[in-house]
Every structure is written in C-alpha cells, then in structure tokens.
C-alpha cells in the first residue's frame, strides 16, 4: 500500500525490505556474431528495472506486504486503528479504515493476477469484488445510517461495481472503455477527497467533517486513486509491474503530504511516525524499481 497504510505489526518490530541493486554496463560490441554472444547474454540477464532489479519481483514483494496489511485492516479495523496510533477510533473512522482494507485487498488481487499474465479485464473485475463485498457488508449492517450518512452513495458505488464486474467477466461492451470508466470514477473520487474532503463527503450526504475525518478521507482518497491508477495502467496496456508501481504513487504523495507538508497525519490524526516512514520507504522503492 503505495499507499499505503502502516504495516499491521507491533510498532517496535523491525521490518526490512531489501532491494539488491545489480550493476548494469551497456557496451557496444563491434565484433563477429560468435564473439558477441558470450558478452550479450549476461548483459541481457541483468536488464530490468532500476539497477537491473527485476520489476516483477519488486512488484510481487510489495503486493505480498499489501496482502498481509489489507487482510488485517479489513478484518480487524478497530485493532488496526489503534495499532496505527488512533487511540479511540469512532465508528466512522473504523468504517473508513475497513473500506480502505477492502480496496487494498482488491488492488492486491488484481495486481497478482496481472503479474500472472491474466487478461486486464479479468484482473479489474476480480479486483472489484473485495470492495463490493465491503459495500454490501456496510449496507447489510446499516453502518452508513449509524454514522449519519445516507445509503445513496453505497447503492451508487455498489451498482457501478456490479455492472462493471458483470460486463468485464461476461464480455459485454468495450472492456477497455469500461476499465477506463472505472478508473476515472475512482480517480475522480480519490483526488476529490484529497483536495476537498468536506465537499466530496458532503456530496455523499455527510453533513460535517471534523479535522481527523478530513485527514482520514485524504488517506481514503489515496487508496481510491491507487486502485484507479492500477486499472488505468492495465487498460492502457502498461506492463503489469509498471502499472503496480504507478498505483503506489497516489498514497505515496498523500503520505509525503501528511508527514512533511501539512503534517496532519501525525499532528491531527495521531498516527505513529515509524510505520508511516516504513510505508514511505516501501512506496518510494516500489515506484523507483518498477517505473524507472
């Protein structure tokens, strides 16, 4: 999690993600074909992402971390909130974090399927299933009503996801256009939440957004944008590893803002700095080793 949320382990546990850089030297070989082959072969084996590191291996490692993290925050949002530094999370805060988790589960599933060589439309469809499950869970438990939010937005987003999943899996319509529509919708909501959380929340019926909710909505916007960026990358025909790398950019920017620009992630929401820095390192490494 790009973006990403802090890794769900005890705060003092040391977690290290090591990327080994391999040196790559390009040489112009002016010789006979027979003499050139022994030199060209090892050079081609080294070519990959930044420093010759295999972008797919980096993307797979990042997705593995995301899988662990997403499972934790979607299945246990209250303990997750507390583990991240939110001492007394409200029902609304837990609900947002839980939905972040379902989005991240979907992104992780879509990413793994893309790396496995599956069709981009199928990757997107399967990636939409976890957030749809989260939406249905919220509707069945009446969470929105308990938080003072109309259910209209949940029905709208649920309907969009159902229609998209059925169309993409059933082969109905232009899959590339549907994928770009899904990406555009998530990016519209995600960027809107980061830039004007109160306005977007108001459009969904939430009458008041306090400072802590504002910061949390910015983070949620990062997660939505991560998903949108991945789907847009896959729909545009980017290599899976590069699409996964670009999907880390939104949350990386949100964390840079929350820790070093506005500093509201720590000063307002009270998130622990250590895990934030860990995910900043992971996000920056993934972007560098898969896109450069």
Image (cartoon, rainbow, N blue to C red):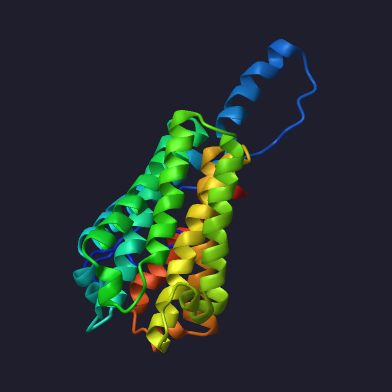
| Occupied quadrant, residue 162 | top left
Q: How many marks?
A: 0
- Residue placed most toward the observer, 236 or 156: 156
Left or right of residue 268, residue 291 in this image:
right
The answer to whether any part of residue 140 appears in the image is yes
Left or right of residue 80, residue 100 in this image:
right
Q: Is residue 51 above or below residue 176?
A: below
Residue furthest out toward the right: 30
Q: Is residue 69 above or below residue 86?
A: above
The answer to whether any part of residue 17 appears in the image is no
Q: Which residue is drawn at the image coordinates 43% and 40% (left, top)?
A: 165
Q: Which residue is drawn at the image coordinates 36% and 53% (left, top)?
A: 131
Q: Is residue 286 above or below residue 154?
A: above
Tell me residue 105's x, y (percent): 34, 51
Q: Is residue 45 above or below residue 9?
A: above
Tell me residue 140's x, y (percent): 23, 59
Left or right of residue 220, residue 194 in this image:
right
Q: Which residue is drawn at the image coordinates 43% and 68% (left, top)?
A: 220
- Residue placed most toward the observer, 237 or 178: 178
Tell me residue 80's x, y (percent): 24, 69
């Amino acid at each position: 999690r790009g973006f990403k949320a802090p890794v769900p382990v005890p705060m003092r546990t040391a977690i290290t993600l090591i990327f080994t850089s391999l040196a790559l030297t390009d040489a112009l070989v002016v010789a006979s074909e027979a003499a050139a082959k022994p030199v060209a072969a090892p050079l081609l084996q080294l070519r990959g992402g930044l420093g010759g590191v295999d972008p797919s291996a980096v993307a797979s490692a990042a997705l593995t971390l995301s899988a662990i993290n997403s499972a934790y925050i979607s299945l246990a949002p209250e303990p997750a909130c507390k583990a991240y530094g939110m001492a007394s999370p409200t029902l609304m805060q837990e609900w947002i974090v839980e939905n972040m988790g379902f989005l991240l589960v979907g992104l992780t599933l879509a990413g793994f399927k893309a790396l496995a060589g599956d069709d981009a439309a199928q990757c997107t469809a399967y990636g939409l299933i976890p957030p749809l499950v989260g939406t249905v869970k919220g509707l069945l438990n009446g969470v929105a009503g308990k938080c003072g939010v109309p259910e209209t937005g949940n029905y709208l987003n649920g309907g969009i996801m159902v229609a998209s999943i059925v169309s993409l899996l059933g082969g109905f319509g232009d899959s590339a256009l549907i994928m770009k529509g899904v990406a555009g919708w998530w990016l519209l909501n995600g960027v809107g939440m980061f830039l004007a959380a109160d306005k977007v929340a108001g459009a969904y019926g939430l009458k008041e957004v306090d400072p802590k909710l504002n910061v949390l909505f910015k983070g949620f916007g990062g997660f939505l944008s991560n998903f949108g960026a991945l789907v847009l990358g896959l729909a545009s025909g980017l290599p899976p590893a590069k699409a996964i790398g670009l999907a880390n950019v939104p949350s990386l920017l949100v964390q840079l803002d929350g820790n070093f620009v506005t500093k509201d992630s720590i000063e307002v929401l009270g998130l622990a700095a250590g895990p934030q820095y860990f995910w900043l390192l992971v996000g920056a490494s993934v972007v560098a080793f898969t896109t450069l």
